[in-house]
Amino acid sequence: MTRTTNDPGDTGFPDGERLHEAFAEEIDRPGLDGPSYDAVLRSGNARLRRRRVTVGATFAVASVTAVATAVIATGGGASQNVNAADNPTNTTPAAAGTTTAPSGSAPGTTSSAATSTTAPTSPASPTHLPDAVITSGALDGHAWQLVREYKLDPGPPPGITSMPGDPAPHPKPQWCTSLNVIVDGVWTDAGAGGGSCVPLGQQEEAPSLTDAGFASIAIVTPNHVRLGAVVAGSVSPLTASVTAQCGAKSFTDKPLQPSGDNVAYYAFTLPNGSGCQTGALSFFDSSGSRVGAMSGVAFEGGK
Amino acid sequence: MGVVDQRDRNESEFQDFVLARRRALMHTAYLLTGDTGRAEDLVQTALAKAYVAWRRVRDVEDPAAYVARILINAHASERRRKRVREWFPGTVPESAVADRAEAVADRSALMAALASLAPGQRAVVVLRFWEDRSENDVAYLLGCSVGSVRSQASRGLAKLRAIPELSRLFDHSEVTERLGR
């Protein structure tokens, strides 16, 4: 049989049948049932709630913008250098044991404080939070920062116009969170995005204590030299600490909640040669109770 | 009918729609993304958007096509951001290096070939040859011209046919003959 999926008069694609069968084989696998109805309902209701939360949002956001800017100017990042002092193979000699050095921009060091004076934040949105430095440091003489940014999603792409009677108005524009790494002042776009998107004037909701995110982001120079990776993710502001375990080594970080943000972020830096390809993360609340964990985490998976 | 009854009826209709369509949407989303997690996110996003405006969605001529277009738009929007999604516990591999290599090896030649297509071509190929949609339908879903769909389908197929690992799929003599006329 020859499948002709074309309209009458069109050139036929007789191999369409085989392609269709190959597609059928491809999707004949477990895990492709789709989301549960409950999950869809929760997501739908969350969208409804976000639409309703508009009262005073613009004023509130404008207020916290000023506060958040001050945080960037004074630093406030908090991270641990997972490589620490016990890794003799590290190619960044000065990195060892300098996890709390305040002089974040000094070559060869990693720092928990934001390099505030050199933070190349993108222009602050007049209607949303400005970029916030989660952590920063220097590797092999290259200054780098991990930044939480809100990217403007301008709406449907060219060629895809608004849907007739659009049943789900795509926010135009909307803001989407992502983590990005800046090296030597250059945004590498190697980060982990795809976070929540919210319409203008609305705030991202705080995640629950058990809803932790994870990403391993490569730290790469503008000349494509990989310096290491930063393991980071979003957590509830109620998360008091995050522990990364890599072999016998264990490191703890106190998540940073950028001013005005409903989300906190943790970060661990892994210079090249840290030997921490995989590990585990544990999340603790203020009482010290473990509220979440991840094992077999690809610490150096960042590309 | 009271407000509550109407709401119950809407939810019941929506639930029926979700249960009837989610697998098909998931299949398309998987072929578009090549990743089960992203596909599920995409489907959930599309259905959640449909839920928000269900009263309007249910009244259109073809709600399934409507929601398919929401999914396509959501995918295009995600693609435009060109970012990698955050990984969550359920999707973190046990062993990074080994599992990555295995994952790459396990990917079917077809999915790898699909990934080599330009995003627009991939969408056209999936909608035309998986969903069996007409060129007009695909043009509507992608918001482009029929001519663009036709050329993208032709080029996409030509690219797939040129991939040695997919040679078993195509009868080259027949295809050459038919397309060459």
Image: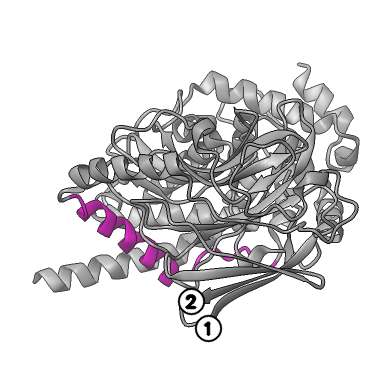
Disc 1 marks which residue? A289
Q: Residues within 10 Å of mark 2 (few under 14, many from 20)?
A: some
Q: Which residues are magenta?
A: A30-54
Kind of residue at badge 1? Ser
The residue at 42%/70% (across/down) is A238
- Dominant secondary structure of the magenta stretch? helix
- In three-dimensional space, the C-alpha distance between marks 1 and 2, rounded to whole angstroms, equals 6 Å
In the picture provided, is A139 more to the left or to the right than A135? right
**Which chain hosts label 2?**
A
Q: Is residue A52 covered in magenta?
A: yes
Q: Is residue A30 above or below residue B31?
A: below
Task: Assign a secondary structure to mark 1.
Answer: loop
- Image quadrant of residue A170? top left
Counting from the top left corner in percent of width and height, residue A66 is at: 29, 40
Does the residue at mark 1 contact the one at mark 2 (Cβ under 8 Å)? yes
Q: Is residue A131 above or below residue B91?
A: above
Residue A285, label in figure? 2
Kind of residue at badge 2? Asp
Of residues B145 and A64, the one nearer the viewer is: A64
In the picture provided, is A201 more to the left or to the right than A73? left
Q: Is residue A234 covered in magenta?
A: no
Task: Assign a secondary structure to mark 2.
Answer: strand
The residue at 45%/65% (across/down) is A236
